[in-house]
Image (cartoon, rainbow, N blue to C red):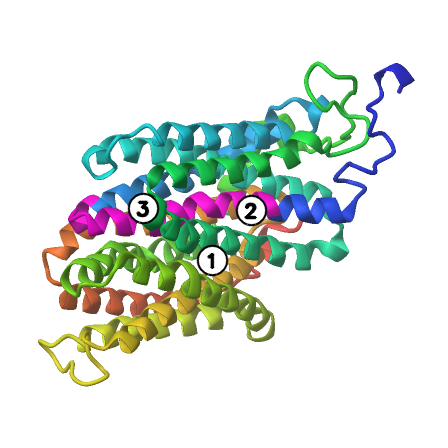
Amino acid sequence: MPPSEASPRQDGGFTLSENSLLRLLTLCILYVAQGIPYGFVAITLAAYLTSSGLEEGVVGGFLAMMTLPWTFKWVWGPLIDRFGIPSMGRRRPWILLAQAGMISTIAVMAFIPSMSEHITLLGWLVLIHNIFNSLQDVAVDALAVDLLREEERGRVSGLMYGSKFLGTVIGGAFLSRVLVHSGFNTVFIVQIGMLVFISLFPLLLLERPGERLLPWTAGSAQSNSTDAISQSMLLLFKRLGRAFSLQSTIIAGIIGLLLFIGSGALGPITQKLLLQDLGWSQVELTDIEGFYGVLLGLMGSLLGGFLADLLGPKRIIAFGSICLGLSYLCFALMSPAIIGSGWFSWDSYSAIVTYLLLSGFMTSLITVGLFSMYITVSWPVVAATQFTAYMAILNLSTTIGQWTAGHFSTLGVVTVLIIFASLQIAVVALLPLIDVHQTRRVLGEVS
């Protein structure tokens, strides 16, 4: 490359490909950026709207606007692979676009005079925000695939996933307290400030030496990737169709579609029960769900990853799903209308906290088991896109639950808990039909 076109960072000291510490820090902090708005919307804002008197169906529909874009995030994979500004890096321009969109939508939310009175407008802004958030998620994952060395992928992936939990703590427990003490204006200022700071990492750091920092600065494309998928979307979708033509890959998707409907629907239903019917304060609930619950979820994720390697992912999914179903059933039995009395009742703060933390722990355990199963069952030729499709199915499962929360709530809390306890346990019967090695055995490692 002629010296006149070289980037001043050509030595690699400030490039992600050649500085492992910067690479780790950047990937993790970008995952924090995904978790902050999620925690803010799913925990802080949802609790505020419920405390304002909105019904489960309204809050559930609002939360569904948040998760809906994640059900279509598989679309981003082919677009990111196919298009971009190579001179600025394969993934970095997409990350910058996503960050700008996330910051802009949060800034627009700050001008809404009353959140509970403009729930439709707020829902659309949340949907648009999560379109950008899901774009960042896929772009950051692609960046990790491009740059992480084989010997660091395991530990860095764990730290990245943990960083999203950290962001959820910030958006849930921390921003909830800011809201209670200082109001929405301060919440939005703090949130925008954090996202702007995080955006400095992809803005000021290059993927590889010799690339452009900005479109008008010196540099050129440095990636030599010639992956066939990036050359033809038609080829990608043909291969993806073959990957989803087998019994194991189809049933794996069906399981993912069913597993989180219950947790999606019970979220707003439980919030209404605690905040409106049992008189809990918003801070009480957000501290449990946004801090202790997230930390326990992180522990569940780490333990689930270890146990999935030791015992197999299907066993972990089965164990977690059965325990989660039993927790729903036990919570139903705590109702005064059934056998609720003493510690084992809806009047017992400790018993309810135990239920909330246990269900969150089991959900994390199931999620990590599914991640492990989907990695193995995916066809290596289209593994990234197929895995992203499975992740989208999991988000669709949650969205379906949230969207139907209002309809289920008319049946009564106890009946709803029993229905979803039954579904959660029944899904386990499909797991033996999956042979996680079928895809590679039938289709081979390459095409």
Whether label 3 touches label 2, CB < 8 Å: no
Instruction: Give the label, 1 or 2, closer to the camera.
Output: 2
Say what secondary structure mark 2 lies in: helix
Q: CA distance from mark 1 to mark 3?
A: 39 Å
Instruction: Give the image quarter of residue 349.
Output: bottom left
- Image height check: is 367 above or below 53? below
| The magenta stretch spans residue 355 | no
Q: Residue furthest front?
A: 181
**Residue 9 pos. (x, y %):** 82, 30
- Residue 379 visible in rendering: yes
- The crowding category of the residue bearing disc 3, from other C-alpha atoms within 10 Å (few below 14, some 14 to 19, many at least 20), is many
Going 77% across and 30% down the picture, which residue do you hit? 224
Going 78% across and 36% down the picture, which residue do you hit? 14
Q: CA distance from mark 3 to mark 2?
A: 20 Å
Q: Between 382 and 355, which is closer to the camera in this rendering? A: 355
Disc nearer the start of the sequence (1/3): 3
According to the image, label 1 marks what residue?
248
Q: Between 31 and 400, which is closer to the camera in this rendering? A: 31
According to the image, label 3 marks what residue?
45
- The crowding category of the residue bearing disc 1, from other C-alpha atoms within 10 Å (few below 14, some 14 to 19, many at least 20), is many
The kind of residue tagged 2 is Tyr
Whether label 1 touches label 2, CB < 8 Å: no
The kind of residue tagged 3 is Leu
Instruction: Give the image quarter of residue 271.
Output: bottom left
User: Which stretch did the figure color magenta?
Assistant: 29-58
**Residue 410 pos. (x, y %):** 10, 56
Instruction: Give the label, 1 or 3, closer to the camera.
Output: 3
- Residue 322 visible in rendering: no
Disc nearer the start of the sequence (3/2): 2
**Res 31 label:** 2
Instruction: Give the label, 3 or 2, closer to the camera.
Output: 3
